[in-house]
Each structure stands twice: as C-alpha cells, then as structure tokens.
Amino acid sequence: MARLSNAALAALPAAIRRPGYDRGALTPGIVHLGIGAFHRAHQAVMVEDRLAAGETGWGIIGASLRSPGTAEALNPQDGLYTVGIRAGETTGLRVIGAVQRVLVAAAEREALLAAMSDPAIRIVSLTVTEKGYCHDPARGELDEAHPGVRADLASPAAPSTAPGMIVAALARRRAAGIRPFTVLCCDNLPANGSTVHRVLTRFGALVDPGLGAFIANEVACPATMVDRIVPATTGADKALVTAALGVEDVWPVMTEPFAQWVIEDRFSAGRPAFEAAGAELVGDVARYETMKLRLLNGTHSTIAYLGQLAGLETVFDTISDPAFARMIRGLMDAEIGPTVQGFTAADLDAYKTALIARYGNSALRHRTAQIAMDGSQKVPQRLLNTVRDRLAEGAPVAGLGLALAAFLRFMCGTGEDGAALPVNDPMKDRFAAAAARAGATGLARCPAGEAAALAARVTAEMLAIGEVFGTLGTDSRLVAAIAAPLARLWAEGARATVRAHV
Ligand code: CS2
C-alpha cells in the first residue's frame, strides 16, 4: 500500500481535512525537541492552523533525542501524519503538515545544533517529559550528579541531553551575535518556564560564567500550561487511520476533542499568533498550571496507581467503577480544589466536572500503565505540593494519603495477583531497594495482623528518598495518612480500600 505523502494528499477522501496551503512555501521557525505523540496532537495542531492562515515562517523541525522511531515513521511521509479525534463512536481525522522533517539528535547532532543556531529559528519548544530536564524534582534545580549532565559538561560542544543541546545552541548563537530563541517548555513541570530558565542558566554557568549570565539575562522561557490527553498509539489505531485514508500512515496520533494551551506572553524573537489558534496568551500562567497539575495530573496519577493495583487497564475502566469515581471526585472537592486559588467556585466546579467527563471518554483507552511511569518525577508537583499546602493549613490529607499509599505500593513492584507491576521509572532501583529494606519485595498481599508494621516500614523507607519527598517524610501527619491506607492495601487490596475510603 502507498504511504501518506505530499503526492498522496490530493487523492485523500473528501471528509479528511488536510493542509490547504502550499507546504513547499513553508520555512522553519520552530525546532521542537521531543517530537512524541503529545507535541504532534497539541502544539503542532495549533501551529498548523497558523500556517494555514498564512504565517508561513513557522514550520517545525522536530527532533527526537534518542529514538529513531518518529523520524523513521514521518520522514518517508514528508513529515505528514494524521491526528484522530475520538469521542464515543466517532473519530475525526485531520492530516497535519506543520512538521517539515524530523532529526534524531543521537545520530544527527550537528544537523540539529546547526538548525537550532539558524537565525530563522526563533522558538525552541520542548516536550521531553519530566525526566528530560535532568533536574531534581523536589528542588527544581539542575541535578549536577546526573550522568547525562556530567557527560555533557565534560564535552559541552557534543551534548546529548535536552538542556545540554539548548545550552550548546545558545552558545553558538551568542558567539555568532544571533539573538537567542525563546525556549518554550511544554511539559508538566511546576512553574515550567522559570524552572527551565534556572536549569539552563546553571548549566550554562557551569560551561562558562559568561554564558550563564547571557542565559540568565537574555533568554526568555515563558511558562505554559498544556493540556490534551494523548494515549500511546496502538496497532488498531494505525489500521483504522490507514483504512480511512486509503494510504498508509505508520504513526498517527489519537486524542480527545479537548485541548488547552495557556502561554505566558513573553517571547524574545516573535511568535505565531497562537491566540488565533485557540491558545490563551496571558500575563501569569501560575493559577492555570496549578489547577491543571493538581486537579488533572494529580488525579490521573491517583487513578493510575490505584487502577494498576486493582488490575484496571485504562482510566475509563477505573473511573467507570462508582467507588473509584467517588473517590476521585471527593479528592478533587475536599483536598485538591481548596489549594487552587484564583478561580471562582463555579469555574472550578465546571473544570472538575469536565475532567471526570474526559476520563469517561470510552474511545480513548488511556492506559493506567502509561500514566504510572516516571512517578518519581511526577508525584512531587502532582500530589506532594498539594500535601504541603494542606499541611501548612492544618487541613486533613486522607485522600492524598491514599493516593500516595497507592504510589508506594505500586513502587514495591508486585501486583495483588503476584504478577510484576510495570514499574518504569528512572528511580526504580532506589524504590526497589527501599522496598527490600522494608521486607516488601515480591509481596502480593500481607496478613492483616502484619500489615500495619509492613506499611510503617515501607512508608519510612520510601519517604526518606529526599529527591522526591523533600522533608515531608518527617511530618507525622503525612506518615500516618499514608501508612493507614497502605496497610489496608496490603491486607485487603485496592478495591476494598477505595470502597472503605468512600
Ligand atoms: C498523564 C499526562 O501520562 C501522564 O502522566 O497524566 O500525560 C496527561 O494525559 C496530560 O498531561 C493531559 O494534558
């Protein structure tokens, strides 16, 4: 079967939206690092709208840091791919033309650095996931002991991490007298703009103090809040899209109708009119980010860990169980919502209701295992900052305690049925060692009489991991709020624990 390509566009079925502009006239203005499904279903779609509206100087050069998969899929398709929007039984398809080509940093470092140093590139955006910033998630500072950071600092002109790449490109631009690009972080980090600015400034200063000062003073890193649920593409998705197109798309992306992008309007070298594509350009992103990270991502992780323990494969499966749905809505209403400032009660209520509806999108099949990965990098901003605010007010944290108990229980690595859990985390070994010291390795269940002692040991060992928990492990209120449901998880399982909680 023929492949999706520029040549195939004209013959696509009429119902399929496609680039209505001359792709040959595009010039690149954005380099995007970490061109995974999320970027392709979110930012690239809004860029596509601006290209179609005539802003032809903002084509995207995508880059994967290591994996050649996206480049191998998209380059033979002239960068084209399909976005499938799923709601109930219907899937709306749109072919996106914004990505001009995809590079693989590990194999084409020089080509990528050359692109990033080109004066035409005015924005370098990123979706490299939380761990891609090589920072300490509890402190939000560059992790100078990170092996990738150490290697990049030893040879800064030949970097392999995302911060190393950006710093190397900024150094070239500085040397050539080219004004810096804007660094646009599109990952779910707290205060993502200032966090990235701090990481890059420190990295630059370690390379050369003058470069550090240049980054500190000249490089704009606007904060953003990004939101769209984009599950990993499956073989069935590819088959569905290919059948509808009549040509093969080897890597479409599937998503939901909802999309939100709130951007701090602070760009050093211009930007597309993102507001005309549905983005919200604001002066201060913080309240949107707190709302999204805590209410959406915080409950997403809660669903992921409890769902994994209960043997529930998707978010939809989990939220379809009435006890889990009540637990999640109760967590939003009683504990997380009160920490989100700056919205009316009605707006917050509508946001929470919409979230539950989005989780109930039966067509998305967003896997709990996908969300559960990299918890050590996610839980600090998703759950622990909420805990800090609650404890500072002397407010109860029973629901957050259950969520964290499920996280710790998951990190012990063995499911309630005795099978291995899909623990996929850069700090996996640290958590496994803590579980081993607590005597939890390989345990599926624990007799009720021993569960409290086991839970106390697991809580103490794991909360001592300071890079994740900071000093929260010394707060007896939190320790108690985790240890009690954790004992129940060991003794009775996740379903019974959630039922008892609600
Ligand atoms: C999810 C997010 O995988 C995860 O950890 O919580 O990717 C989530 O789907 C997005 O942030 C939604 O905007």
Image (spheres, rainbow, N blue to C red):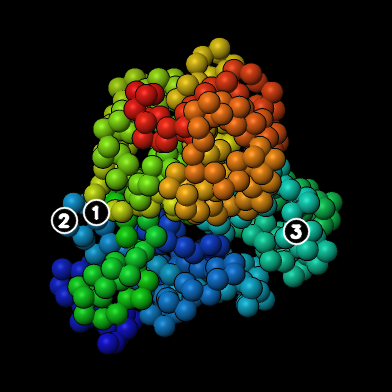
Residue 128 bears which disc, if any? Answer: none
Three-letter code for the amino acid on which mark 2 is drawn: Glu
Mark 1 → mark 3, Cα distance in angstroms: 40 Å
Residue 17 lies in quadrant: bottom left
Question: Is 53 on the left-hand or right-hand side of 74?
Answer: left
Q: Quadrant for residue 451, please give it.
A: top right
The local crowd at label 1, few if under 14, some if 14 to 19, many if 20 or more residues have their Cα within 10 Å, is some
Q: Is residue 356 above or below residue 433?
A: above
Foreground residue, 176 or 92?
92
The reply to whether residue 438 is visible in this rendering is yes
Residue drawn 62% across the image and 77% down it: 108
Reading the image, the residue beneath label 2 is 89
First along the sequence among labels 1 and 3: 3
The C terminus lies in quadrant: top left
Residue closer to the observer: 126 or 233: 233
Question: In percent of the image, x 59 and y 69: which residue is there?
Answer: 66
- What's the residue type where badge 3 is placed? Pro
The residue at which mark 1 appears reads as 363
Reply above or below: 158 against 385.
below
Residue at point 50%, 53% (across, down): 420
Label 3: state its secondary structure: helix
Work out whether residue 309 or residue 33 is closer to the camera in this orientation and state it.
Answer: 309
Judging by the rendered image, the residue that carries numbered circle 3 is 147
Q: Tell me the kind of residue under disc 1.
A: Ala
Q: Earlier in the sequence, mark 1 or mark 2?
A: 2
User: Given contact means CB atoms under 8 Å apart, are the residues at marks 1 and 2 in contact?
Assistant: yes
